[in-house]
Structure formats: structure tokens, C-alpha cells
Image (cartoon, grey):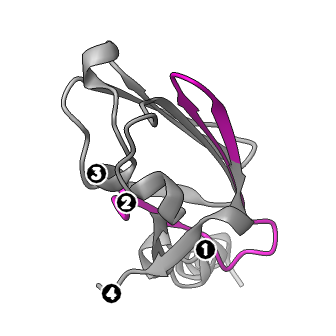
Amino acid sequence: MSKRSALLLFGLLVTFCGPVSADNQELHAIVWPSVLVSPSSDLRVDDIRIALDCGEFRKLESIPSDWNVEVIRQVSGRSELHLSAGHGASDLASLGPLNGSIIVSGSTERCFSLSITVTTQTAEKRLTTADISLTKMVR
């Protein structure tokens, strides 16, 4: 086989046998525990940090007014999403506005895990994959 033929064959193999794109992965929405979704007079959420292993943040469907968003995608396979209120007046009384609006992929991977820290004016709540629900998105 000539060098040119070998390169052509290699190119075809890379094109047709390459990694499956993330577009073929199932998408899931993060659904918060009901205690954080129902409005509460003492729950003033001002910071949310989500660390995702072996998955990707694919979409954020809504951002509350005067909130900041930062996404960190590391080569290590760990991604982080940080949402924070601009100032006290933009704190959320519940996570209802964000319920189902954060879309992730990779939940079928063995190493997939979520760790979430929700900071309120009075407490810090730590959540794991077991505490939240992932709802499959229909395309």
C-alpha cells in the first residue's frame, strides 16, 4: 500500500470511526428538591455552584435578572457552573426560576456526578447527585 493510500485510509477511519459527538448524548435537566423550589420567606438564594464530573453543561435556559454566570471547563473532565446574584435585591426566594433550566449531558457515564452548593443569606446547602433529579429532555 502506498503512503498516499495509507493516509487516505487513515483520514477515512478518523472521519467515520471518530468519537461520537455530544449531539448524540442524552440531555437532562437539573430538577431541584421541592424544599428549594417552593417559595419561602427565609430562603434567599444568592449563590449557586455546580461541579460536574464526566459530563457537560449544554444549556442554561434562563438567567434571573441581575445574576452573573461563569462556566469553567477544565481538560480534566470536570466542569463548573457558578451563578451569583448581583446584589441583595436580586436574591431568589426559591430556585423555581432555575428549575429545569440547567441542561447537562453525560449522565449515562459511569463516572458522572454532580455536587452542588446553594448559598442563602442564612445557610449553605450541599447537594449531591442523590439529592436532585435529572429529567430526560425530548429533542
Residue on which disc 2 sits: 99
| Image position, residue 34 (x, y; %) | 49, 64
- How far apart in space, not on screen, are marks 3 and 4 (Cα)? 20 Å
| Image position, residue 112 (x, y; %) | 73, 65
Which numbered disc, 3 or 4, marks the residue that appears first in the sequence? 3
Check whether the beta carbons of the residues at disc 2 and disc 3 lie within 8 A of each other: yes
Say whether residue 31 is magenta. no
Residue 30 vs 91, above or below: the answer is below
Query: What amino acid does circle 4 point to?
Result: Val
- Left/right placement of residue 98 relative to residue 114 reads left
Q: Nearer the viewer, mark 3 or mark 4?
A: 3
Residue 68 vs 61, above or below: the answer is above
Neighbour tally class for label 2: few under 14, some 14-19, many 20 plus, Cα within 10 Å: some
Residue on which disc 3 sits: 97
- How far apart in space, not on screen, are marks 1 and 4 (Cα)? 23 Å
Residue 114 vs 83, above or below: the answer is below
